[in-house]
Amino acid sequence: MASYIARRLLWTVLLLLVITAVTFLIFYVLPTADPAAQRAGRDPSPDLINAIRHQLGLDKSLPAQYWAYTKDLFFHFDFARASSTTRR
């Protein structure tokens, strides 16, 4: 019985990782506007856009962005911030 529960827990963790990875990649590859430019407002300077990208973590590599996404999603329960870090 303990091995069955352990297997189910492992499959649950694996399934959660796969679902978060697929969700992250879907939002990453969708052709949408740059979230840093949207957050900067009308007629932003390139320095402001770069500062916002750095603040959101969009200047990091894809694995680093995914780690920040999963960390925010599972440990901070901040769904709005987690979804905003998935954009390029």
Image (spheres, rainbow, N blue to C red):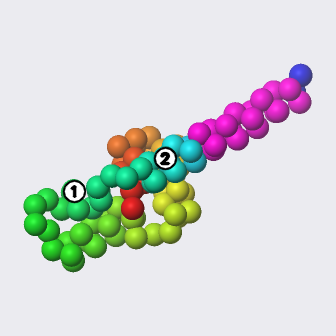
Residue in the picture at 82% in, 33% down? 7
Question: Looking at the image, which is closer to me, 28 or 16?
Answer: 28
Image quadrant holding the N terminus, namely: top right
Residue in the picture at 10% in, 61% down? 42
Which residue is label 2 attached to?
26
Where does the magenta region start and end? 3-19
Which residue is label 1 attached to?
38
Q: Quick one: label 1 or label 2, which is nearer the N terminus? A: 2
| Residue at far left of view | 42
Q: Is residue 75 left or right of residue 85?
A: right
Q: Magenta span: helix, strand or loop, mainly?
A: helix
Image spot of residue 3 (x, y percent): 89, 30
Question: Looking at the image, which is closer to me, 25 or 85?
Answer: 25
| Residue at far top of view | 1
Q: Amino acid at mark 2?
A: Ile
Q: Quadrant of residue 16?
A: top right
Helix, strand, or loop for circle 1? helix
Question: Looking at the image, which is closer to me, 31 or 13?
Answer: 31
Image spot of residue 26 (x, y percent): 49, 46
Residue in the picture at 40% in, 47% down? 83
Image spot of residue 17 (x, y percent): 63, 44
Q: Quadrant of residue 43?
A: bottom left
Q: Amino acid at mark 1?
A: Gln
Task: Sort mark 1 into few (<14), some (14-19) or many (20+) by Cα contacts within 10 Å.
Answer: few
